[in-house]
Amino acid sequence: MTISLETLPRHQAAVVDAIDWTRLATPEARRLRELGFDTGVPVQVLHRARIGGGPVACRIGRMTVALRRAVAGAIRVSVEPLAAE
Amino acid sequence: MDMPPLVAMVGNPNAGKSALFNALTGARQKVGNYPGVTVERHSGRLALDDGRPVELVDLPGAYSLEPSSPDERVTRDVLLGAQAGERRPDALVVVVDAANLDNHLRFAMQLIALGLPVVVALNMIDLAERDGLVLDPAVLARELGVPVIPTVAVRRRGIDVLRATLTDVVGTGRAAIGAVTLPDEDIAVLQRRARALSRAATVSETPTRRWHHALDSVALHPVFGPILLVGLLFVMFQAVFSWSEAPVGWIEDGFAALDAAVEGAMAPGFLRSLLTDGVIAGVGAVVVFLPLILILFLFILVLEASGYMVRAAFLLDRLMAGVGLSGRAFIPLLSSFACAVPGIMATRTIDDEKDRLTTILIAPLMTCSARLPVYTIIIGAFIPARQVLPFVGLQGLVLLGLYLMGIIGAFVAALLLRRTVTKGESSGFMMEMPKYQLPRLHDVVIGLWSRALIFLKRAGTTIALTTVVLWALLSFPKAPPGQSQVEYSVAGRIASGLEVVVRPIGFNHDIALALIPAMAAREVAVAAIGTAYAIDDTEDASGAKSLVDHLRGRWSLPTALAFLMWFVFAPQCISTIAVTRRETNGWRWPLFMLGYLFVTAYVMAGITFWLATFAGL
């Protein structure tokens, strides 16, 4: 099952399935790659800032990265059935 | 004389580069600037094991060789030998975070591909081990083809081995390098290779409950996070005022003693007056703010070094996005409460050009410490020390109001600027959140020391010069008996011209006089009024009165309030204008900043004066 990173429940283990690069500005897309976002990489949502649409903090590889909701929305993730506790 | 070989330290942000740099060079370091850009250049001398000296330069952290901020551009240009005022490095120390190899190895591989002799410092290996990660440096060294040295910069572990390896590499490594070229490889491909390499070098990994995750669940909590942030800011501003009280007293006493010593040692006359009324009074009025600035910077450095600052940016991103900025603007804006100059310099980490420009333009609206002497004197003279609520005095409330006025003004300005002159796509917010770390005393002290030096240099040059010039303009030509010296002097005549312009907003001749030298630095306004009254006092048979008595006698309450409001907005600081010019590469934006802030200051001071007058204050 794939969902967007924006709606991924907190602490739910997932893997990046696809990134819609067309929805991102060029420098944004490059920085996202530099921070290690790529298909097949494990990702997890750790925190969401306020309910009003603040950024999300997620675990990617061994890093914690803050992203705006719009960027998170461009990232499709597949939920690992095993880790779904 | 031959220049010693240049070794550059380079790596991702948060790899612990600066700590390693400090561990290698100790106190023997120099902070300068790259010509044309305001990126700080940190360099230091280091003796290799065979006695050869090398110069070590700490390059700004970067994610790749494709720059997206002025900082990263310097890193790339130095590495390619294209940076003005810098030699091409003869060797590199590539710093990687042992606990984040997946990501840092990718940049390390790009750097190794440049073909310069390289030593890799596998830094913060202790933190990786604490997180349950066991690595094999030998595997990394074999796969990368360069020496890999495990280090713990903050505990000085591995430093000797690193220096010994550097001795082997410098000058002997792959010598005779031709033109360095940029390796043309896809980030995603490199990233996959880095991840594979990281897996190969990992001996074992035991998941542990990481304490920084526990900290984050409080710091980033939707409810407790903002409460913690407001609490921290409150403690910070509280400390700035309460902790500084005693040291400010010592500095004041020191300058008073110096003044008395000069008075005693010299015969009355031109030179003595220049030294006491001009230099000592002027510089003293500024140096007393050193404790406030250092305490504010202490908090900012600790918040930054601990990793909390990025959490604050995360919490505030939504709020900042509302006025077209990003959470990243929080760090420069917070620094601007100490001084707009380092604040504006801190905007270099903002990738988006429009976003960065907007932050620069509103930074002077944060109440910097130079406004405090002006605020405290005027509030002390005109606002009664009355309790309005338990623990809440009227004077404190007015001061808080002035701070809030600046913040609200900045938000409104950002909103308007983003819709007009700095219009553009809303910028993003994408930031690595570093692990929490206990800030190291040594690094904090070095940071504070360089801040103190910059401030004292400014007080010793710009401000001393301005006060001396003002003193001279006020003292000549000598007024005939019966006329006021201040009115008769050159400065007095210039002020009379300016008075025509500022009269409609309730400003009198004294204020017009103070505004001119205050262009150099706001705090000079107080010294200027003080000097003017002191020079007039000597003419006056009735003897010296305190500055506060003078103010009460000569200013009305609406005038005083308008003066306060003026200082909330007026861009009266040469250093800010100069740093804006440097940061924006031209006169266009500093002139725009001067224009929009002066107009705002004039209008707001006028509104305040007339409202207060009609309210019968």
Image (cartoon, coloured by chain):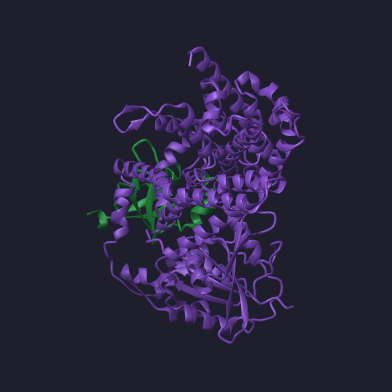
Chain colours: A green, B purple
**Depth check: B196 or B346 in front?**
B346
Q: Quadrant of residue B355?
A: top right
Task: State the residue in front, B484 or A21.
Answer: B484
Query: Would residue B258 be found to the left or right of residue A20 on screen?
Result: right
Using the image as rendered, state which of residue B338 and residue B76 is in the foreground: B338
Query: What residue do we see at 67% from left, 68% from top?
Result: B181
Look at 37% across and 52% down and name the residue there: A58
Position of residue B314 relative to residue B390, above or below, is: below
Asked if B613 appears above or below B435 in the picture, the reply is above
Instruction: Tell me if residue B56 can be seen.
Output: yes
Q: Residue B555 lies in what quarter of the image?
A: top right
- The residue sitting at the left extreme is A85
Picture coordinates of residue B303 (x, y %)? 41, 53
Q: Is residue B141 visible?
A: no
Figure quadrant of residue A13? bottom left
Residue A23 image offset from top left, x and y in percent? 50, 43
Q: Is residue B375 left or right of residue B124?
A: right
Number of marks in the rendered image: 0
Residue B402, percent from left and from top: 47, 31
